[in-house]
Amino acid sequence: MTEPAPSLFPNALSLTVANVPRSIEFYKQKLGFKLAECFPDKKRPCWANLVLGGQSLMLGELPSLAEARQLGMGAEEIDLVKQDARAFARGAIGVGAAYYLLVADVDALARRLKKKRVKLLTPPKDQFYGIRELRVADPDGYRLVFYQPIAHACDGTCSEHAGAGSKSND
């Protein structure tokens, strides 16, 4: 039985893993998750969204610098990828985990956070996959990604924006 992938989940956990295909198999076979979608395709995914009981768990490998540029990441995002790669190699706390929180207005939140002297890791930015997001870190280094839905900039495969892509309902 497949579980249809909703367009967005209100909250979703994103974990950096060493090997997405291996992790997909673990979550599916051992824990009963269903694969909702993956990128760029099912044969060689570097990112996946798995669902269990309406809850989303995203798994992803850190992109190389070339892949980060191909995905349209800006300088601030690429700096975070570099930091994450070094910290992930050391096994630092908080590296590789990001908690996505749905908000009504990312830009209004950014203004409030700046007034409270919260350092934004990335300013509000429209992503090709249909969200506007900003990133902050908590005191332990865990990333919080506040987002709001926007119109998708791609046709469901996102191939014209980031190489090739596919969705799966496995």
Image (cartoon, grey):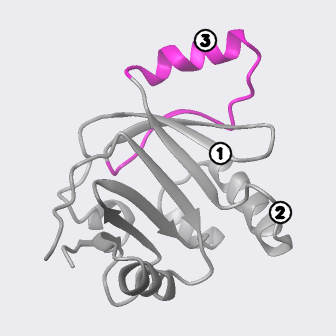
Q: Nearer the viewer, mark 3 or mark 2?
A: 2
Q: Earlier in the sequence, mark 2 or mark 1?
A: 2
Q: On residue 42, which mark appears?
A: none
Examine the image and state in which quarter residue 62 appears. bottom right
Distance between the alpha carbons at the discs numbered 3 and 1: 18 Å
Pointers 3 and 1 in contact (CB under 8 A)? no
Please state which of residues 108 and 99 is positioned toward the viewer in this rendering: 99
Q: Earlier in the sequence, mark 3 or mark 2?
A: 2
Residue type beneath disc 3: Arg
Crowd tier of the residue under label 2, counting other residues whose Cα lies within 10 Å: few below 14, some 14–19, many 20 or above: few
Q: Which residue is mark 1?
A: 143
Per the image, label 2 sits on a secondary structure element best described as loop
Please state the horizontal and vertical placement of residue 152, each as a whole percent of the image. Answer: 25, 45
Distance between the alpha carbons at the discs numbered 3 and 2: 29 Å
Question: Against 93, is 113 above or below?
Answer: above
Question: Against 152, is 60 above or below?
Answer: below
Crowd tier of the residue under label 1, counting other residues whose Cα lies within 10 Å: few below 14, some 14–19, many 20 or above: many
Q: Which residue is mark 3?
A: 112
